[in-house]
Image (cartoon, rainbow, N blue to C red):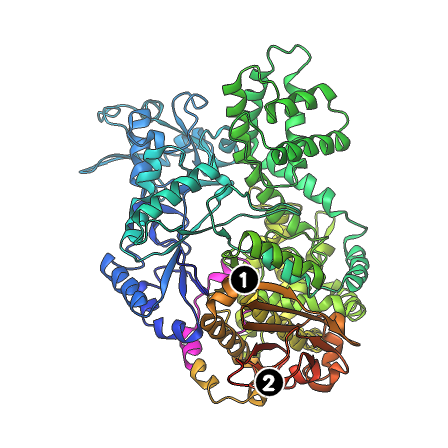
Amino acid sequence: MDRPTATYRLQFSKDFRFADAHKLIDYFEALGISHIYASPLLKSRAGSTHGYDVADPTTIDPEIGTEEEFAAFAGALCERGLSILLDIVPNHMAADLENPWWRDVLERGRDSEYARYFDIDWERGGGRIVLPVLAEPLDELLASNSLRLHQDREGTWLEYEEMRLPVAPGTYGGSEALPEVLAKQHYQLEYWRTGAQHLNYRRFFDVTDLVSLREEDPEVFHRAHERVLAMVRDGQVTGLRVDHVDGLRDPKAYLDRLQLAARAQAKDPGDDFYVVIEKIFSEGEELRADWQTTGTTGYEFLNAMNGLFIDPAGLELITETYDSFVGGHEVYEDIAYESKKKVMRDLFAGEMRSLNRRLTELARADPAQSPEDLSHALTEVTAAMRVYRTYIRSTDVSDKDRSVIEEAVAKAHERAPNVPGEAYNFLRRVLTLENPADEHSWLSLVKRWQQFTSPIMAKGIEDTAFYHYVRLLSMNEVGGHPERCMSTPAQFHETNQRSLEHQAGKLNASSTHDTKRSEDVRARLNALSEMPHEWMSAVTRWRDKNAPRKRDVGGEQAPDGREEYAIYQTLVGAWPLDVGDIDDLRGRLPSVIEKMMREEKIRTSWIDPNEEWESEVQTFLQSLFDDADFLEDFRQFQSRVQVPGAVNSLAQVLLKAAAPGVPDTYQGCELWDFSLVDPDNRRPVDFARRVKSLPTLVDATHQDLLASWQDGRIKQFVLQRALRFRGEHAALFADGEYVPLEVAGEHSERVVAFARHQGDEWAVVIAPRLITHLCGDGWPIGEVWGDTCARLLADGHWRNVMSGDVFTGAELLLADAFRKLPVALLTLEPAAAQ
């Protein structure tokens, strides 16, 4: 297996092509990267900024380069000993005419050779595909002549605004009226607001223009993967990252097939192929042991590490502040539960109606069941699920899956006792396949249900509850828990030890294209938990000062307390270090705040925007930038979190680089990066600046790095030193044991330390945490650590990779370890060198 030692995520698009990445290979190699972790490279919709809307999986996206340019880029990487970890999208494609498979299905319907490729319920649609793409009801558009028929050399088309749809051959001879033609098509046009209720194809989450594939079909798998597997065969790609594995009908079967196909194409066909999966774990959940994957993309590591920098005592005080803004105490679990029910009702009503119809059919022989009761039971149990999905493949249900379902049924019955117990019991029997009356039908429903619990969880939690419960935004991250995100060093060590045992080759993430806030934004916000009184005083003062800026909308003040509180946190986390970048932040924030409001789904939403409310909130936001008194007060407070946030970030870099797993760097994050939720985090990266700064680190003193820390070179320095050391000791970090180290002294709780050990090789990591009050007016280095010391387990000469200092013995004072920089990576010198 070609296991990476360090990955670097690149987002390819028309604005960042293969040729651009090719010029940066020297830089990536010097930084210590072994694999470019590439966003999807197959042909996507024109202008795509992410590549997840694949339009043609058989070819490279021409917007990011030609086949020859890709071959040149991959070949140049190979010559330097680097490779590509490729992000692939097996679950869905663009429901767009740029997708030739989809276009053929729209034109030919069930007679298309590609009809079986897509997850379409033809029976439910009466043999047609429901397309909820109209901005107005169909009868209104017909009356206004907004729909037109057009003929050209390519055929006959139905045109509507910027969209064109194929007209089936033989259904238009030139004289029919338009309604007659529409009735003969293999698709049914509907108003977007109501059409989703009748949708009969599975989507990616609630995105109507992304249609799901039937990867369980061997032919579909082959056609969708042939170009990717050719890259594997040619040695251009040596690892795969699988997007949204939970959306697949049978993730285990898919991974088995993918591993077999990749091995067959790889240069060393006998070896396991490196495959990581995007999988979000809930609390207590672990990777399935029988899945053929090296591990996950690292959200569980991100959240375990993030929790190290949150002070539980301070968080309790922050809760009081938050409660005062929202007008009472909120219970996150209740919000999450209701949010999942809300998205089922508003976003997935069609899918739930289809599941309910199937469930009712299974219950026909049971006179005790009513369709209404079963529908309510299914909604409540789905909302009560604590994991994204179960993985039932046959009537042989695992104890793990059965336990998850029985727990959800019990919770649902407790929350909604008005639903008859008979309905819950019948549903439990169906979902656990207990004595099925019709094995095929019951299993079919369970497999379909499993594919929907994941998007319901994602939209209900990540894209609703996380925007509603905003006590401390750094805790609201993918795979995280806004109430229980804290972790002690002991818990962090336990996470790492489990990873070494079960997922030694997984990615360790800190920022990704899906994180809602960058690692540096979270690092700052975490520092608020260490200064809860100062934070309470500041936000209360700002609320009072800015109250006159609010405006009445429908009898309520905009923004409401929750929105205002989130705005202040966002400003604290994302405020630039260079005053020249403030206008840039001011321009970026409106789309971020709009997304925050609409995802919250209280005052406004994507499907029912309240433009008046949104306008007043945006006016409030912009007015903050024009108030010199507020800005002076805000800057004085925000400056308090800058150094603690920077220290937290440096500690994260080192922990990520040395922990079991593969350290992953998101593009641009080797310097300070204060990006927010996508598309903000997909903005162009100033690589010229990064390339220019890297050589300056060779001669830079530690005093220089600290004195000019705002330029980010100190972060680049720590990352490069750590990654290059890891690359030089690849076996130690890949397979070496993980040993928690004891720390003693007055600040022992402000440190996390561990060793990696294999044979005669030792590496020790010492990182600070909860250090805000050690910073004072400077950095937490030197004598501020008092008598705090780390016990190193091995006696000898230790060299600090970060500072060059050498220490002797088996015990080290942190005042010495952090003499020059607030992080330490130690290596035990060989006996000959000693």
Q: Which residue is mark 2?
A: 706
- Residue drawn 69% across and 53% down? 482
Is residue 814 visible from the viewing direction of this image? yes
Q: Is residue 829 left or right of residue 377?
A: left
**Amino acid at the residue labelled 2:** Leu
Q: Nearer the viewer, residue 562 or 444?
A: 444
Residue at 60% across, 26% down: 431
Query: Which residue is more in the foreground, 157 or 789?
Result: 789
Residue 629 appears left or right of 215:
right
Q: Is residue 533 above or below residue 431?
A: below
Residue 113 is drawn in which quadrant?
top left
Vertical side of 419 occupied by 566: above or below: below
Res 511 label: 1
- Residue sitting farthest toward the front: 832
Residue at position x 71%, y 78% in the image: 636
321 within the magenta span: no
Foreground of the two, 564 or 141: 564
Quarter containing the C terminus: bottom right
Q: Is residue 797 above or below residue 591?
A: below
What segment is highlighted magenta in the picture? 671-692
Where residue 654 appears, x then y in whole percent?
57, 71
